Amino acid sequence: MDSLENLHYAIGQLAFAVAFADGNLQKEEHDCFRNIVVQELQNDSYDFDVSDIVFHILEKDRIDTETVYEWAMKEIRTNAHYLSPELKKKFITVMEKVSNAYPPVTHEETNLINRFKKDIEGIHGDPVFYQK
């Protein structure tokens, strides 16, 4: 995967963390998550399904939310040169849509989204890379 694909994979991980923040992931939540991620993140320039990859790995291994969050943020920092302001907004939108998709929005989900907004605020991409 290239840097832009890695960023999309990272937000797929974060979206999973939001969906799983309450400790349960209902089938309806899984389906809704997949639809949101595909709609918001699927890109014609690569031929993999972000949501399927994320779910296969994270659901199988039952990795905790904090670990998933740290992995994703490390990936975002590593590939930050491609992180445009628009992509940051899209990532926040994805997390919020996943959170709102299956009520109620829990305190854990809200905290995770707020933490992400704060953490990503100081990360700035390089226009040389993302304006190609």
Image (tube, rainbow, N blue to C red):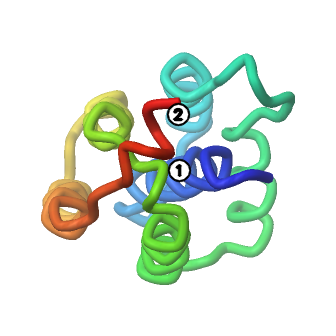
Binning the other alpha carbons within 10 Å of mark 2 as few (below 14), some (14 to 19) or many (20 upward) gives many
The residue wearing badge 2 is 33
Q: Nearer the viewer, mark 2 or mark 1?
A: 2
**Which amino acid type is marked by label 1?**
Leu
Percent position of residue 42, x then y: 64, 24
Above or below, 17 against 84 in this view is below
Q: Nearer the viewer, residue 109 or 50?
A: 50
* Horizontal side, residue 128 vs residue 53: left or right: left
Quadrant of residue 110 in the image?
Answer: bottom left
Q: Nearer the viewer, residue 21 or 126?
A: 126
- Asked if the residues shown at circle 2 and circle 1 are in contact, with their CB atoms under 8 angstroms apart, the answer is yes
Q: Nearer the viewer, residue 103 or 116?
A: 116
Q: Residue at x 55, y 30 (%)?
A: 37
Quadrant of residue 23 in the image?
Answer: bottom left
Percent position of residue 40, x then y: 49, 23
The residue wearing badge 1 is 25
**Which amino acid type is marked by label 2?**
Phe
* Horizontal side, residue 37 vs residue 58: left or right: left
